[in-house]
Image (cartoon, rainbow, N blue to C red):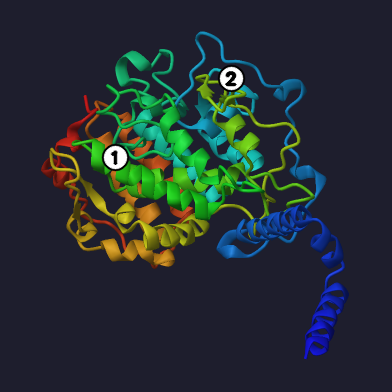
Amino acid sequence: MKFLYSSAALLLVTAAQALCPYAERALQDPSFLKRHLEKQESSQDEAANEKRQSGPGGIPFTTFDKNQLIDVTGDHAWKAPGPNDLRGPCPGLNALANHGYFPRSGVVPLTVGATATNQVYGLAINFGLPLSVYATLVDGDVVGDTWSIGGKQPQTVTSPILGAGDGLSGSHNKYESDASPGRGDYYLFNGDVSSLRVKKFKALYDLQKNKPVPNYNLDVLIQHRKYTFDDSKNTNPYFFFEPFAGVAVANAAHTFIPALFSNHSTQYPNGLLDKQTLKSFFAITEAADGTLSYKPGYERIPNNWYRRPLGAVNEYTPASFAQDLVKIAAVVPEAVSVGGNTGKVNSFTGVDLGDITGGAYHTTDLRNPTKFVCYFYQITLALVPDFLRSEALGSALGSALNLLHSKIDPFVDPKCAKIANYNDTFASKFPGGAIGQP
């Protein structure tokens, strides 16, 4: 019997050695097996990250070429903003200005807003142009067709009469929103929505703290979306989530991080957003002890950074965002709800979109990618006139509305439901609806 056990043991060892070339060494050195398994786990994590970070609809990118490398030399070398240069709440836009892809002043012509975000980040024109039009008409110079990525832009000949807008930093509840991925809520920080809150960034940063191959992909940003939404809901009695600035822009700000900041290199054609790249885009430095520090306005495109491929299949479109939004809603259902806290923390109350859009769109429609794309364009067309009519534009109102329709109508599917009766009275139910308004 003893012979049989010995023979069986010998057979098992022999078989193990045949199946695993590391078995003999592992038997002699247990720490070797641990190191080998950790290496395997790292490779598996790397493969999983590569699979998850892909093109629109989860389809892996199929093209890569050297033209995806973004030039950060010569005219596009990084320069710190000057004392009169404007920088604001969006790290990607600040980086474009610091590298000269936007005017370094931070005052952006309407068309440049769309073309630069396309060429540098791969944001589709049918996404970037409506955002640039919206920024121009709601927060910019409606005569000069410019907008500011930060605060008020310098006065022009028409500014004393028409005003040149308050810029993105002054666009609370119009463009900028509570529950940002990195910035603080207006009420909690005395109106400062431009400064990065390191605590909030660290919450994102630590989500990949112990990963062998850190990658801040959409799965990670969805976790951060839950954190940011819950943080606003639980700490800000005046938290307010608006139909465009909240549902569209604040959620897009989360998806833009992996979609537009990932490095699509030869090694990772489907994109990898590692810690160094993330810190560079957010103007964060890390000390040897792990302490994070933020330098306002110092956002930078990293060296050897490759944007996502261009072309209809690969660029980040409203349809791409709509698909990502469905994934967000599966984890954070409230993130696709218009509403807010009612004067005390953790009192979030939603309002059905049907009451706001005259029945054209309901909250459940935002989980349907096709209907959301319709909603994205239609809410823009409904909101801008609502904002413009509150300004003393006079004869400029007509030209502003013509600009709105001429730039956005070509992207609108004629089958989309139109918002004929936009009802903004819903905001009066929420004290945060008036926060930041003149």
Quarter of the image where the N terminus is located: bottom right
Spot the residue most to the top.
Answer: 83
Residue density around tag 2, few if under 14, some if 14–19, many if 20 or more, within 10 Å: many
User: Residue beneath label 1, please?
Assistant: 232
| 78 horizontally vs 8: left or right | left
- Give the vertical position of 419 relative to 93 (above or below): below
Q: Are marks 1 and 2 in contact (CB under 8 Å)?
A: no
User: Residue beneath label 2, please?
Assistant: 104
Image-quadrant location for residue 176: top left
Depth order, front residue of 33/87: 33
| 80 horizontally vs 422: left or right | right
- Give the vertical position of 246 relative to 58 (above or below): above
Depth order, front residue of 7/390: 7
| 94 horizontally vs 27: left or right | left
Q: What separation in Å lies between label 1 and label 2 (alpha carbons)? A: 32 Å
Image-quadrant location for residue 403: top left
Q: Secondary structure at mark 2?
A: loop
Image-quadrant location for residue 375: bottom left
Disc 2 residue type (three-letter): Arg
